[in-house]
């Protein structure tokens, strides 16, 4: 009985104490803000852990919000939206990405047989981050990702004006060269980068070759690798050239070599110029492309070692030549590149040894060459870097129209739309249309 009485007495005391607090506000404390349980008009400086100052007092907030919402500043607000491919979130809405359209090549002529203007363009559509979009498949590998159309003075061209996708007029040959770093530093990365670079180079060439073969167009490739001298493949004793797969057998770099990057690039521009002069990929829509890979700053192109030359082989199966080169700097490369505007240059910078000034030189090379610059520092990601280059070519579209237009100046607009999201991009340009300004179309071979 004593125990029961004590409990009852304690409960009475506790109740009396609570009744003296006028709804929780203690007269003894008043409104000085020292009590976290005060209901005075002024909010307290803090509440106990797990509580918030809500409705004039400290209380545990109701964290249960409807599905798709979370609590923020005492209120239930929408979670981040799940936007579809081709969209991004702005505030509480999904907004269609704004695409960009890059015209890689453009040719126009006047067809004397029907008095129509023929216009053919090769172009790449990019998302907001600059990634080239596949015109056939979207991010979910669903077909028909992009639709493109040419407008003339804001009016779409007639369907009958479109050139057939299989037309010989839309085909373009490609001459592509690789300029690969073969200095000892390629073996010092963790993991070493030399073997992944070779494997990625083979994959790029093979993939692009297969795309061009499917289009019944010609694909020509060249290879240069470098340290302080410049190496080139040579035919074997049976006069057989290197295959793409032979790139995996490039000899291992040796310690103590130097980096003559600008010499190698300058020399490779000359290779493309010679190919063009010999009518390889020399048509109006044909392409010349160089892919440069380097993992270190140039430290030897200042030195004239043009007297160096020789040959090498791998077990009598693969052969190569090497040569030195005159003193060359960035300005020499830029000047030679400007003399051959048909060449586009894509650059892959790799590794932490590249200083910011050297990275900028590589970016400038890609900018002047109307290409793209990619950078990475992880050897395991080399395949992705080279794949980014390959994507530039396998996503390229060609659109051709032949439409009757009277003499005069016209505004053209190449527009692309992402089917799933409605994202759009466009490239506008103008042309003076006349037989004299365009010139006659060449006969189809």
Image (spheres, rainbow, N blue to C red):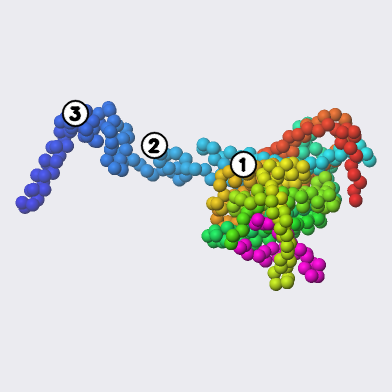
Q: Foreground: 87 or 260? A: 260
Does the segment drawn in magenta span residue 297? no
First in sequence, mark 2 or 3: give its number: 3
Asked whether the residues under the numbered discs 2 and 3 touch, taking CB atoms below 8 Å apart as contact, a structural biologist would say no
Residue at figure coordinates x 64%, y 59% from the top left: 182
Q: Is 8 in front, or is 281? A: 281
In the rendered image, residue 244 lying in the magenta stretch gets the answer yes
Q: State which mark lies toward you, 1 or 3.
A: 1
Across and down, in percent, residue 198 comes to: 65, 61
Q: Which mark is residue 110?
A: none
191 left or right, relative to 320 = left
Res. 153 in view: yes
According to the image, label 2 marks what residue?
73
Of residues 299 and 47, the one nearer the viewer is 299
Magenta stretch? 226-254
Residue at mark 1: 128
Q: How many other residues sit within 10 Å of disc 3, few (<14), some (14-19) or many (≥20)?
A: few
Q: Residue at x 21, y 28 (%)?
A: 32
* Residue designated by label 3: 30
Q: Earlier in the sequence, mark 2 or mark 1?
A: 2
- 38 versus 304 height, above or below: above
**Nearer the N terminus, badge 1 or badge 3?**
3
Mark 1 and mark 3 residues within 8 Å of each other at the beta carbon: no
Q: Mark 2: which secondary structure?
A: loop
Distance from the alpha carbon under mark 1 to that under mark 3: 60 Å
Based on the displayed image, in which of its 4 quarters is residue 231 positioned?
bottom right
Q: Secondary structure at mark 3?
A: loop
Q: Judge from the rendering whether residue 1 lies leftward or rightward of residue 431; answer left or right.
A: left
State the image coordinates of residue 249 (x, y, percent, origin top left).
67, 66
Taking the spot 24% from the left edge, 36% from the top edge, the residue there is 36
* Front position in the image: 120 or 136: 120
């Amino acid at each position: 009985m004593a125990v029961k009485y004590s409990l009852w007495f304690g409960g009475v005391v506790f109740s009396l104490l609570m009744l003296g607090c006028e709804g929780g506000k203690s007269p003894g404390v008043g409104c000085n803000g020292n009590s976290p349980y005060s209901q005075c008009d002024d909010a307290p400086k803090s509440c106990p852990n797990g509580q918030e100052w809500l409705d004039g007092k400290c209380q545990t907030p109701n964290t249960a919000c409807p599905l798709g919402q979370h609590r923020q500043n005492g209120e239930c607000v929408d979670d981040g939206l799940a936007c579809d491919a081709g969209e991004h979130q702005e505030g509480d809405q999904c907004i269609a990405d704004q695409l960009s359209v890059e015209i890689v090549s453009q040719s126009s002529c006047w067809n004397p047989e029907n008095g129509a203007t023929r216009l053919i363009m090769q172009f790449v559509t990019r998302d907001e981050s600059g990634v080239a979009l596949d015109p056939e498949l979207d991010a979910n590998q669903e077909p028909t990702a992009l639709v493109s159309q040419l407008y003339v003075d804001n009016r779409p061209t007639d369907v009958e004006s479109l050139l057939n996708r299989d037309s010989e007029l839309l085909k373009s040959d490609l001459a592509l060269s690789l300029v690969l770093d073969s200095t000892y530093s390629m073996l010092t990365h963790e993991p070493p980068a030399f073997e992944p670079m070779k494997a990625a180079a083979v994959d790029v060439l093979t993939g692009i070759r297969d795309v061009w073969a499917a289009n019944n167009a010609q694909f020509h490739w060249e290879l240069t690798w470098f340290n302080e001298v410049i190496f080139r493949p040579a035919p074997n004793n049976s006069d057989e050239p290197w295959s793409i797969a032979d790139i995996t057998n490039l000899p291992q770099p040796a310690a103590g070599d130097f980096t003559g990057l600008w010499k190698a690039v300058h020399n490779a521009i000359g290779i493309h110029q010679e190919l063009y002069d010999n009518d390889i990929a020399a048509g109006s829509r044909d392409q010349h492309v160089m892919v440069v890979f380097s993992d270190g700053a140039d430290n030897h192109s200042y030195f004239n070692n043009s007297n160096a030359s020789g040959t090498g082989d791998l077990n009598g199966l693969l052969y190569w030549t090497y040569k030195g080169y005159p003193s060359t700097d960035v300005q020499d490369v830029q000047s030679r590149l400007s003399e051959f505007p048909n060449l586009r240059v894509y650059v892959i910078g790799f590794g932490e040894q590249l200083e910011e000034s050297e990275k900028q030189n590589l970016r400038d090379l890609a900018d002047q060459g109307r290409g793209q610059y990619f950078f990475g520092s992880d050897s395991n990601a080399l395949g992705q870097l080279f794949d980014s280059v390959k994507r530039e070519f396998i996503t390229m579209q060609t659109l051709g129209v032949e439409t009757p237009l009277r003499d005069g100046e016209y505004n053209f607009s190449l527009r692309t739309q992402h089917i799933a999201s409605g994202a759009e991009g466009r490239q506008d340009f103008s042309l003076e249309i006349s037989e004299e300004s365009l010139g006659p179309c060449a006969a189809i071979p």
